[in-house]
Image (cartoon, grey):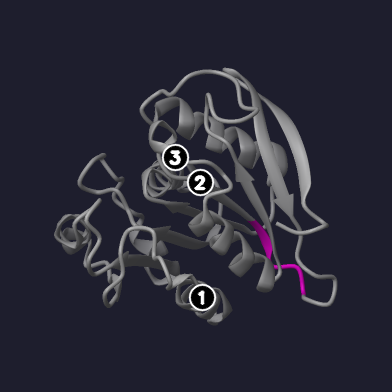
Amino acid sequence: MNAQTERLSLAGVAGAIEVLRDRGAESVPDAGVAVIAHPHPLFGGTMDNKVVQTLARAFVACGYTAIRFNFRGVGGSAGVHDEGRGETDDFLQVVRELAPQGRLAIAGFSFGAFVASQATARLDGERDIRRLVLVGTAASRFEVATLPAALHEHTLVVHGEQDDTVPLAAVMDWARPQALPITVVPGGGHFFHGQLPLLKSLVVRHLSSAD
């Protein structure tokens, strides 16, 4: 993403996990560590996806160290796709290795939002999750976890009005029983073509809000 991007390799259950780490500017107070999950690996999703990069840039702009990693079988990550189970385990391994304590944020896009929700449910009560950002949440395709009620005010869910990969109605059906607000981008598609600056500004606004 920039000259300060570090490429790392962690040991996961299925073998190596390829990781990119971007640190916030020294002039910005340290806000913690954000771990970000990418879209479905069987449909070309990687940690270099433009929405994932946009999320990383937003977190870095707000003082977070942004961590992206490739799911199993993608790039330099070992193993094979595990329908979210192993991917959630790997997400948690990245948290243990690179954000073992302190302020933690979790984010994901599409399939990655599903994995991020599952990781959040697993970490509930164990870690203080300061921010959660879910974009293009794949609620029509996977069993997205119910979010802890205490985390709702620290959560941003963004979805495109005209998303033809994950219908907005499916995300509404997931959010409605939780009374969880959704930020809808008018005219937005699944990949937010032409609207990534707007997506970044929405995330920055969320991250900059007072606790």
**Residue at x 50% of width, y 30% of height:** 89
- Local secondary structure at mark 3: helix
Residue 54 lies in quadrant: bottom right
Q: Which residue is mark 1?
A: 197
Instruction: Tell me if residue 65 is in the magenta stretch.
Output: no
Foreground pick, 128 / 46: 46
At label 2, counting other C-alpha atoms closer than 10 Å, the crowd grade (few under 14, some 14-19, many 20 or more) is many
**Picture coordinates of residue 20 (x, y %)?**
70, 45
Mark 1 or 2 closer to N-term? Answer: 2
Q: Amino acid at mark 3?
A: Arg
> 27 left or right of 162?
right
Mark 3 or 1 closer to N-term? Answer: 3
- Local secondary structure at mark 2: strand
Q: Nearer the viewer, mark 3 or mark 1?
A: 1
Q: Which residue is mark 3?
A: 122
At label 1, counting other C-alpha atoms closer than 10 Å, the crowd grade (few under 14, some 14-19, many 20 or more) is few
Disc 3, disc 1: CB below 8 Å? no
Q: Is residue 61 above or below residue 190?
A: below
Q: Which residue is mark 2?
A: 37
**Numbered mark located on residue 189 in the image:** none
Q: Amino acid at mark 1?
A: Pro
Q: Which residues are magenta?
A: 29-33
Is residue 100 at all visible to an observer of this figure? no
Q: Is residue 78 above or below residue 56?
A: above
**Picture coordinates of residue 27 (x, y %)?**
84, 77
**Picture coordinates of residue 172 (x, y %)?**
18, 62
Marks 3 and 1, how far apart at CA:
32 Å
**Picture coordinates of residue 80 (x, y %)?**
48, 19
